[in-house]
Amino acid sequence: MKKRKRVVRAGNLVWATICTPPAPNDPEHVRAAKSRATTAARKALNLKAACRRLEMLLAASFAPSDFHLILTYRPNDLPATRKEALKRLRKFLAQLRAYRKARSLPLKYVYATEGLHGDKRFHHHLVINATAGDYDLIRSLWVWGDQIDLERIADRDYYGLARYLTKEAAEGKPNGAQSWTPSRGLQKPTVETSWVDGDETLTAPAGCYVIERDERQNEFAGYSYIKYRIARPQPRQTRPRRTKASLPIPPTLYEIDAPMRPHVRR
């Protein structure tokens, strides 16, 4: 008996399911059992769900070392409407894009604007690819606030960040609707489907970290699901050559950034 396999890949994040689909000549009770298995598989890989769709988009387009920012406003500069808040954010992004373009640096981002929970003050969540000197540049361009909270994506992981950015529905949209805006050209997850033998199982390759796993089986149908993270290759460690005089070591990409500011949850 053949089973249906579906694999979604986004960067180093992989989701996969295998299930037994119904056949046209199945008796009603067998077809019902198989339908429950396929329904479970669809739910596991439901890319229509806002949180999961954003998780895979972030995993496909951003590295764990990229940034999540929270841009807030001074009391005297607080916008009166969401429209005005978005106008200021887009002006900020246009200036940041122009700065990077002049230096042949790309800009990738996803942003979400919130203002319905907590103290009801508008603020922006912004995920961007990191480059040298980001914090000082962003501080100089964000002229409507005195504080910018910054963290690495790795501090929350992709799912934690996606859930955080989708906790508030966009104005006029139901909970679960897309409430974020991506830049153009972001990488999209790839989806592969195939037929496999009935005895095939889902396992993570050696060295991968299993995040979630689920499996159900009855006499008529089977369903299995796995979500895992592929280990990123580590740079080779080489022994430094001994010299008579040691030269100063240039700063790395992130060492030249301003010190990390403590993150404030909102």
Image: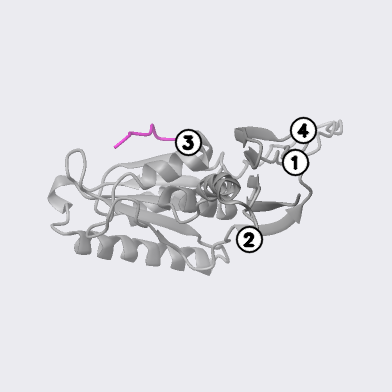
Regarding mark 4 in the picture, which secondary structure is present there?
Answer: loop
Residue hosting label 3: 156
Of the pair 27 and 152, the residue shown nearer to us? 27
- CA–CA distance in space, label 1 to label 3: 21 Å
Residue hosting label 1: 233
Q: Which residues are magenta?
A: 258-266
Of the pair 2 and 167, the residue shown nearer to us? 2
The answer to whether residue 52 is above or below residue 103 is: above
- CA–CA distance in space, label 2 to label 3: 45 Å
The answer to whether residue 254 is above or below residue 264 is: below
Write the residue at 61% across / 35% down.
Answer: 216
Q: Position of residue 22 (x, y in %)?
A: 62, 54
Q: Mark 1 Cα within 10 Å, few/some/many (few <14, many 20+)?
A: few
Amino acid type shown at disc 3: Arg
- Say if the magenta span includes residue 30: no
Nearer-N-terminus badge (1/4): 1
Q: Are the two marked residues, 1 and 4, in contact with CB atoms closer than 8 angstroms?
A: no
Regarding mark 2 in the picture, which secondary structure is present there?
Answer: loop
Mark identifier at residue 246: 4
Residue hosting label 2: 24
